[in-house]
Amino acid sequence: MTDEKKPDNVVFNIENNRYDAALKPYPTSLGSPVITISDTTAWKNRSINKTNHKVNAKYLELKAEYEKMIMEFEYNNLIFNSEFSFEPVIGEIYHLYKRKEGKSFLSLIAPGQCNFKHIGSFYLNVDQTWEKVNEL
């Protein structure tokens, strides 16, 4: 093989000792379109914005669920630490009151039928947890 200089647009493979321009994954002739790198900044910014909104929405959803769970825990803790001399029945609504000396107790008596300080009304779920009932 001679060491003569080949033109720039001719692709000669020294290892195979042959021209292989047709085998290249990119254009090699002078008339080929120019390869340019796409500007992906706008796409990246849109994707980052969408991802941030999605993550923020999920965070707010989880935060609300966490706050609800903590509230349920506090209600259940309050009720289970209160006084009552009966076994609550699943599916019934009970009322939590506070005595003058500060102790809380659970009762079947509705708030309009007694003079104790009403803390809230609660429903006993199937899973033995208490759920606060909205007051009318």
Image (cartoon, grey):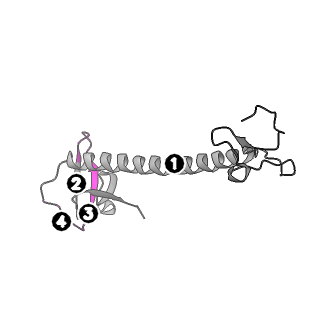
Number of marks present in the image shown: 4
Question: Within the magenta stretch, is there residue 40?
Answer: no
Q: Residues within 10 Å of mark 1 (few under 14, many from 20)?
A: few
Q: CA distance from mark 4 to mark 1?
A: 35 Å
Provide residue 130's location: percent of width, then percent of height. 27, 57
Q: CA distance from mark 2 to mark 4?
A: 13 Å
- Dominant secondary-structure state across the stretch colored magenta: loop
What segment carries the magenta color?
Answer: 87-104
Q: Nearer the viewer, mark 2 or mark 3?
A: 3
Give whichever of 70, 38 is nearer the camera.
38
Outermost right residue: 31
Provide residue 75's location: percent of width, then percent of height. 31, 49
Residue 89 — which label? 4
| Amino acid tagged 2 | Leu
Q: CA distance from mark 1 to mark 2?
A: 34 Å
Q: Which residue is mark 3?
A: 125
N-terminal of the pair, mark 2 or mark 3, is: 2
Provide residue 16's location: percent of width, then percent of height. 63, 43
Residue 60 — which label? 1
N-terminal of the pair, mark 4 or mark 3, is: 4
Residue drawn at x 42%, y 65% as measured from the top left? 136
Residue drawn at x 12%, y 58% as measured from the top left? 86
| Amino acid tagged 4 | Val
N-terminal of the pair, mark 2 or mark 4, is: 4
Q: Nearer the viewer, mark 4 or mark 3?
A: 3
Q: Nearer the viewer, mark 3 or mark 1?
A: 1
Outermost top residue: 3
